[in-house]
Image (spheres, grey):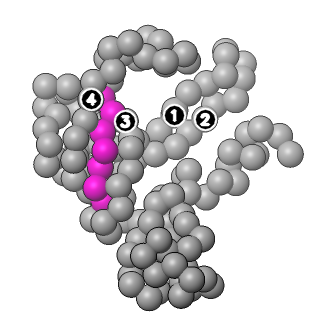
Amino acid sequence: MGVPRYWREIPQRYNLLGKKCSICNEVFFPPRVICPTCRRKSIGKMEEYKLKGEGTVETYTIIHDPPPHFEGEEPYAVAIIKLDEGCKVIAQIVDCGLDELQIGMRTKACFRKIQEDGKSGAIYYGYKFRKIT
């Protein structure tokens, strides 16, 4: 299997698919096999759950010194977002001025380019979050 196909076949990367415990109704992202609250009772009772993709910024940081492959994109913001379903995700905030960022800001997931392996390499896509206006 080629690298691009491998990345395309990870459903939660593109669709924000999590798991929901049918016993306590807690939602998890990334997906879990067993609920940490219900433990053994949840075996076989974790259902696939499509997250709505909307949430609130809990905290954020602005990256000024990026890791390799992200040079030239700085400064950019990365936030912990509490989704409406209760789970938290870490994602880049886009389409929003850095001076507009604030804790409590409402956001929505959007599909964007993450990075590229060289000029002729694979392009990786995934979710980022944007401000809801």
Name the kind of residue labelled 2 in the image. Tyr
Residue at 13% x, 25% y is 99
- Name the amino acid type tagged 1: Lys
Instruction: Give the Cα distance between marks 2 and 3.
Output: 14 Å
- The picture places residue 82, in percent across and down from the top left corner, at 28, 55
Q: Secondary structure at mark 3?
A: strand
Q: Earlier in the sequence, mark 1 or mark 2?
A: 1
Q: Earlier in the sequence, mark 4 or mark 2?
A: 4
Q: Is 114 placed above or below 34 here?
A: above
* Structural crowding at the residue carrying mark 3, measured as other residues with C-alpha within 10 Å and reported as few (<14), some (14–19) or many (≥20): many
Helix, strand or loop status at disc 2: strand
In this picture, residue 57 sits left or right of residue 7? left
CA separation, marks 4 and 3? 10 Å
Marks 1 and 3, how far apart at CA: 11 Å
Mark 1, residue position: 113
Q: Could you tell me the amino acid type at mark 4?
A: Thr
Mark 1: few/some/many CA within 10 Å (<14, 14-19, 20+): few
Residue under label 2, please give it. 124
Up-down relation of residue 84 to residue 107 (above or below): below
Q: Are marks 4 and 3 in contact (CB under 8 Å)?
A: no
Sequence-wise first label, 1 or 3: 3
Give the labeled residue for mark 3.
Answer: 92
Residue under pointer 4:
61
Secondary structure that dominates the magenta span? strand
Sequence-wise, the earlier of marks 1 and 4 is 4
In the image: residue 60, left or right of residue 123: left
Task: Give the magenta-colored segment's residue range.
Answer: 77-83
Front position among marks 2 and 3: 3
Residue 82 is one of the magenta-drawn residues = yes
Q: Are marks 1 and 2 in contact (CB under 8 Å)?
A: yes
Q: Secondary structure at mark 1?
A: strand
N-terminal of the pair, mark 4 or mark 3, is: 4
